[in-house]
Image: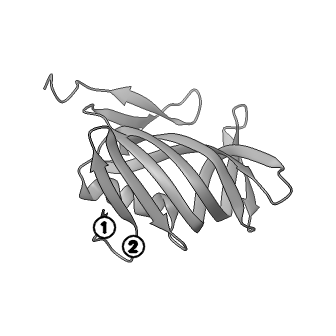
Amino acid sequence: MWPFIGRETLMTFTQAPQGFIIRLEMGEDLHRVLAEFCRAHAITAGILHIIGAVRNLELAYYHLKRKEYEITRIAEDLEVVGCTGNIAQVSGAPFLHIHGVFTDRYFRAMGGHVKAATVAATCEVHLLPFAADVRRVDDATTGLKLCEFGPTKTEA
C-alpha cells in the first residue's frame, strides 16, 4: 500500500490486476481526491464503487423539464451503503459522475446524484480504469453533459 503523493491528501492505495483499491481518510473531499488520483495516474475513463462513511453530503435530483438540479445538503455522518460511478473527461480533466445510496443512524435511506461529500470515518474505493476515450459533452436536449466515445486506446 502506497501513500498518494498529492496536494493535502492522506489517502493510500494499492494496485491489482483489476484496478486500484483506494482508502480515503477522514476529512478528505471525495471528488477532489479521486480526481487528483485520476490525473496522477493518467486515468481518463473507468468505473468506481465506493463504500464507507461521509458527511456534508450534497445529493441532487435532476429535473429534466426544468433542466436543473435540486440539491439537498445533509451535514450529519452517513453510511455509504453503495456508490457507483464513472470517470470521463471534460475539457481534458477527469470528471466523476457518482450516484449513491446512504443511510442515517435510524437506517433511513436516501440517494441520488452525489455532487459533493466529505469522508467521515473512511471510504474504500474500487477504481477500474478503462483504455477508452470517454468524454462528456453538453447536450442541448437534456441540458446534461452526456458521454461521447472515441476509439479505444488499443485502436488508436
Position of residue 153 in the picture relative to residue 145 (left or right) = left
Q: Position of residue 7 (x, y in %)?
A: 34, 75
Question: Looking at the rendering, which quadrant does residue 133 occupy?
Answer: top left
Q: Position of residue 106 (x, y in %)?
A: 86, 56
Residue in the picture at 15% in, 26% down: 154
Q: Amino acid at mark 2?
A: Thr
Q: Position of residue 97 (x, y in %)?
A: 50, 43
Secondary structure under tag 1 reads loop
Residue in the picture at 38% in, 28% down: 148
Mark 2 crowdedness (10 Å alpha carbons): few <14, some 14-19, many ≥20: some
Q: Are marks 1 and 2 in contact (CB under 8 Å)?
A: yes
Q: Earlier in the sequence, mark 1 or mark 2?
A: 1
Cα–Cα gap, marks 1 and 2: 7 Å
Q: Which mark is residue 4?
A: 1
Residue in the picture at 34% in, 33% down: 134
**The C terminus lies in quadrant:** top left
Q: Position of residue 110 (x, y in %)?
A: 77, 47
Q: Which mark is residue 57?
A: none
Q: Residue furthest bottom?
A: 8
Mark 1 crowdedness (10 Å alpha carbons): few <14, some 14-19, many ≥20: some
Q: Is residue 49 visible?
A: yes
Q: Amino acid at mark 1?
A: Phe
Secondary structure under tag 2 reads loop
Disc 2 marks which residue? Answer: 9
